Amino acid sequence: MADSRNGDARAPPGHTYAIDVMKFISRTRALYAHWNEYSSDLWGSADALAVPTHPASTDLRYLKSSALHIWLLGYEFPDTIMVFTSKQIHFLCSKKRSATLLKVVKQPAHDELGIDVVMHVKAKGDDGTGQMDAVLGAIHDGKESQVVGHIAREAPQGKLLETWTERLKNAKFQFVDITAGLSDIFAAKDGTEIINVKKAAYLAYSVMRNVVVPKLDKVIDEERDVTHTMLMGLTEKAILDPTKAGVTLKPECVDICYPPIFQSGGKFDLKPTAISNDDLLTYDPGSIIICSVGARYNSYCSNVARTYLIDATNLQIKAYEVLLKAHEAAINAMRPGRKLSTVYQAALSVVEKEAPELVEKLTKSAGTGIGLEFRESGLNINARNDKVLRPQMVFTVSLGFQNLECETESRSKNKKFSLFLADTVIVKDEDPEILTGKCSKLVTDVTYFKDEKPRKKARTSSGPENFISKTSLRSHNHVDSKDELQMRKQHQAELARLKNEETVRRLTGDSSGSTAKTSTDYVAYKNVSDVPQARDLMIQVDQKNEAVLLPIYGSMVPFHVSKIRTVSNQEDSNRNNYIRVIFSVPGTPFNPLKSQGAIYLKEVSFRSKDSKHSSEVVQAIKNLRRQINARESERTERATLVKQEKLQLQLAGNKFRPLRLSGLWIRPQFSGRKRIPGTLEAHANGLRYSTTRPNETVDVLFANVKHALFQPAEKEMLTILHFHLHNHIMVGNKKTKDVQFYVEVMDAVQSLGGGGRRSSLADDPDEIYEEQRERDRKKKINMDFNHFATRVSALEFDQPLRELGFSGVTDKETVFIIPTSSCLVMLTETPFLVVSLSEIEIVNLERVVFGNKHFDMAIVFKDFKRDVVKIGSIPTSCLEGIKKWIDAIDIKYYESRVNLNWRTILKNITDDPQGFRDDGGWEVLDLDVGRDSEPEEDDSDQGYEPPEDAEEDESDSEVDEDDSENESEDEEKED
């Protein structure tokens, strides 16, 4: 993965570039705040920062100076010197055009930050020493000794930078390296950066899935001679022209992250500097093919790598399964607050447990930070890096086995092989988000299998022993129904294993990334002196400090009321009152021990003769706990209303005009007696919907959009743009996570005179013209919506796959439910249904019984606190299609004959995760397990031929079982 081309951002040809002033202000403010806060730790106590950028180049190179320019200005200004002091920012550039573009930030920087932006323009033919002296004088600021921060590893290039470096050294400053400070501030991405990384990852995995894998499939099936460099060129063209991978991204915004890498034939290099050689692609039995694809969007990088196995040996399968588990363990360990070394240790522990003999073959790094640079310095995932993970960090998690030895009986000509996996991952407050996960890495999806028929011709480079049967990748070839069912069963078994491991890992404490406030965050009294003096040794409730003081061994011991789980009062036959207090203590499920060896008080009881005081104390504690719980519930509820950034309006002018759609309706609708349509406009960082009424305005920020959906009108009367949000917003007085804008494509037609009237007008020219007009109107509206969705480059609109749709009941009536590439939706009726596929734990198909015309679907989420989504009354004719779709998106499904009580099931799992694991995890839902001891029955009626004398009995398949014999006897009598 050679770093060989400039990581700059340039204005597209023929386009006028403008600096995003608001972004410059916010990021400059963040830069100065970080510099001041971590001056001694990361910035070397620098008094000034000097960052020169290299001259323009067509090579691909990743430089910190270029990254800083793109991060602040959205654009790299080549051959420019940028100097930051406490009150000024100096730009020394050689082009008037650069100075003209940079002037736009001068006034806002002064008004918003109190910082003066000073421009120094070098005349053509001038060496710039005069301007340099002015900048050096500003750095001195009247002081004799100043510390100047610079990027130590970037050697000067070009006459201007060489002259600057020489004069800087002669100025007798102290120099410190600021690489660590820049790396730290680039590490955690903001909303705009995350969108760019997601688009880059979307392009990378689409190229891998839609270009690389089909090409490998064709090459192997047709026994073509193709070199690694030829595959590299083909893949690079697909990245630079996203339409070849079925991706609608602007070509001027995309680039390769590194030249695509293809390796096979026993020669493998798992280092980031690897390149594709000119050797032929090897696909003999036992061969390994490693493919790595990196793409950039707006200069932000992404990476994905997969290993494909050809007629794999047992050792190769075992090694790959271990690598897959280790890779998943490393990704799952990426939680805020953890050290990078623990991520590598999580992967290493899996290998030590599953295959100790492979430990020495494991790569010494599990990846690195990624963003504006392909490898962000200081964020290498290895056993020695103690840097702490933060939310919104992005990593390429890459792991491999290098130079493994094949078995002696292997037919492979190459006795050594390597395995490698890489994904782009975002660190989240809860579970990490795998951006390239849709490119499958399951064993069943990366293995090429043999056919029974041999090839017609052998490859010229292979000996007589090496001809193999025709191969095909499971997910890219259609096979007959029996083989398809068998392969789906194997795939589901693999998914079940991975899902059980993931669920148990999550339940037993690996989801510690949650930022929810726990009882340990509460402190009743900060100092001993704050504890009130006890009048006598009696239980007291301190309402002000939310504490309960308990008399223990002659002292009043304070406890915050949140640490009390239950409190009760009982009276015995001797009129003694017993107050029992049970505490929430660590060591129970989901509440692990905080400190090994610490002692916790679990329960305490008190006896009292004063029943009135006992009742008052218990009631006071319960009331206080109720107040705390109510307050926390309100806080949690308000926390969902995340304060959003301000919408940056793009005002209409000579050069820019906001993209807009007019005549739209909104759901949920504004309160009022009469509705009026509004206009949807696209601005710099979001969308604004407004009507002519001043109080009817809704802002939808791009950073808050979880799913953007475009559903054209086909069989419905609505064309829809739907936004499913991360956080709630207010639409009028309604709190919602779903906002929809739509147009009715047909006017409601009322037929006069009944059906006969309608029929008589079937050939009426006016009627035909009206129908054609409605079709044209529908087509135009769909095109306008599609144009709007395509032009809003900050969002990727998902479109429902109608051919995979099915009918079902989500609320009160039957609706048409349609999958998309990322979710399952129903957008035509309220309440809307939008289910993110990445959040699904399992799917259970219920009431699947022979003879039933309908069945139900229960969708269980990874967050067991969420209610299970149920879709009822799905036609049985859709069952096989739904199974295929669920299997294709790598989700485990089960079948049951009855509807299950999911609330009880999930409560039992969360209460006893160890018991859940011991019972086999989700496999308790597998009907096949229960049938092992029963006679084997076929659930389908394919191939069933009834006896000749029983044909009459088969006429009614829906009769009740209890009455079937009587009815068949009655039919025989009638005959």
Image (cartoon, rainbow, N blue to C red):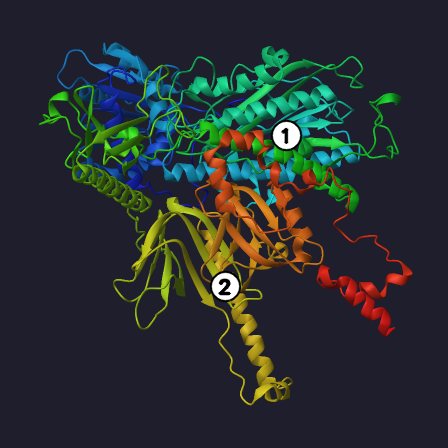
Question: Residue at left 60%, top 86%?
Answer: 755
Question: Residue at left 48%, top 55%?
Answer: 833
Residue 232: image tag: 1
User: Within the image, what quadrant is residue 169 found in?
Assistant: top left
Disc 1 residue crowd, few under 14, some 14–19, many 20+, Cα 10 Å? many
Q: For this rendering, which residue is in front, 237 or 787?
A: 787
Q: Position of residue 384 (x, y in %)?
A: 44, 12
Query: Is the Cβ of the residue at disc 1 closer than 8 Å to that at disc 2?
Result: no
For marks 1 and 2, the one nearer the N-term is 1
Q: Position of residue 201 (x, y in %)?
A: 51, 36
Give the alpha-carbon distance from disc 1 to disc 2, as whole Å.
Answer: 53 Å
Q: For this rendering, which residue is in front, 533 or 54?
A: 533
Q: Which amino acid is tagged 1?
A: Met
User: Within the image, what quadrant is residue 92 found in?
Assistant: top left
Q: Which amino acid is tagged 2?
A: Lys
Classify 8 as above or below 833.
above
Disc 2 residue crowd, few under 14, some 14–19, many 20+, Cα 10 Å? few
Q: Which part of the image, by quadrant, shows the C terminus?
A: bottom right
Question: Residue at left 77%, top 29%?
Answer: 225
Residue identifier under label 2: 812
